[in-house]
Amino acid sequence: MSIKRMEVLKSLAVEAPTKIVMLVIDGLGGLPDKDGMTELERAVTPNLDKMALEGETGLLEMVDVGLTPGSGPGHLALFGYDPLEFPVGRGILEALGTGATVSKGDVCARGNFATWGQRDVIVDRRAGRIETEKSRELVRRLSEAITEIEGVKINYYPGMEHRFSLVFSGEGLCDCVSDADPQREGSPMKWAEAISPEGAKMAYIANKFIQEARKVLRDEPKANGCLLRGFSGVPDIPHLSELYKIKPLALAAYPMYKGLASLVGMDVLDDIEGSPAKLIEELQARWDAYDFFYVHVKHTDSRGEDGDVAGKVKVIEEVDKVIPSLMELSPDVLVVTGDHSTPAKMKGHSWHPSPIALLSSYVRPDGSSNFGERACARGSLGIIPAWKLMGLLLAHGRRLKKFGA
């Protein structure tokens, strides 16, 4: 049904002089803490609260009820693609975001440097979030020591902090492989396994690589090993400009989100800082050249994964401070939401819907008391599938013709 909807929107889309801004606060949603308030509800956000009061609010169901989305599916939904019909692995997103060249038949994987303990127990899946420069040094060491495994060539692409990407190139590779990652700390290593017979070779190569990397990194105090996940090849996905007659720009600092934007045909800026203030400065400088702007703030998610309530609150408040600068540009449509919830209470992604506030000249203000989970749950938008959001933004931007006679 979602692909049919996409085709309908494509047939109705028209060019227009309007500008749309999508501000994504990664992992925005939370859960009540001891004081009964979520991180978002606790944050002092007068500008976001004003936007909620004057606009329409609700909640976005990122994938489906009860399903916890990864960042890839969450973002694809925001861009109008049903993630159940457009499955995309994290590996290809991370690789594209780090500037990798990927060909048909290649398999990408997202790597995490990690701390391994006795008996292959994973002590820290992120190696203490090591510094980016240290991570780059380790990637260089690995690239010099392990160039190929049994005829499969390996190309390396450093990311930020503990992250890096690998591109495996060779005959007979398939991305139907499970993650080589236990997904939780204090658990024994979970090795890659073939999901189908075609994935057997890739699973073997991935596990062999991790074993060889352990030898290279064995003297490191924190990053003495790695994990691999999100095995994926090049997907077939239509571009936003072809679908909706928009000229989109992505403003994101982290490789994976650049990869997501590149995958759906956005122009992507390189080497930009990820603070809310810097992102808005970059947007202001390019305001005249584009008509759709995707702005990504990462560290709400990172603080949530670390269980850092105060840290997540602080990032949300930093975002709130830049809203006036954004409003000075007078966007025709402004939407603020998240790609998923990352409650500090859970230290990870969750299935809870993400708050959304939408502002344009054509809203029916619902008078929401504030931009928080419970207030948004009472908003006029209700709970809507995230992949339907793009149609709503186009409508508010007067970029859709009438459907039917």
Image (cartoon, rainbow, N blue to C red):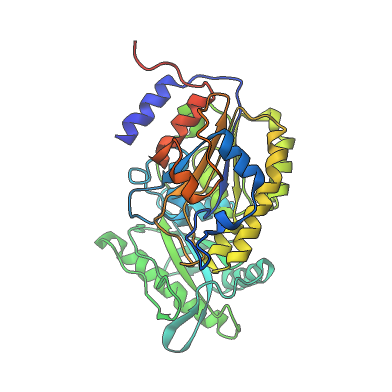
The residue closer to the viewer here, 234 or 339, is 339
- Residue at the image point whose x is 65% and y is 53% from the top: 44
The answer to whether one can see residue 404 in this image is yes
From the viewer's perspective, tell me whether residue 396 is left or right of residue 85. Answer: right
Query: Where's residue 81, x and y in %?
Result: 41, 39
189 vs 62: above or below: below
From the viewer's perspective, tell me whether residue 124 is left or right of residue 187. Answer: right
87 vs 330: above or below: below
The residue closer to the viewer here, 290 or 217, is 290
- Residue at the image point whose x is 48% and y is 44% from the top: 376
Query: Which quadrant would the N terminus be assigned to in this image?
Result: top left
Quarter of the figure with residue 119 = bottom left
The residue closer to the viewer here, 61 or 187, is 61
Query: Where's residue 201, x and y in %?
Result: 33, 66
Quarter of the figure with residue 12 = top left
Query: Where's residue 124, x and y in %?
Result: 52, 77
268 vs 365: above or below: below
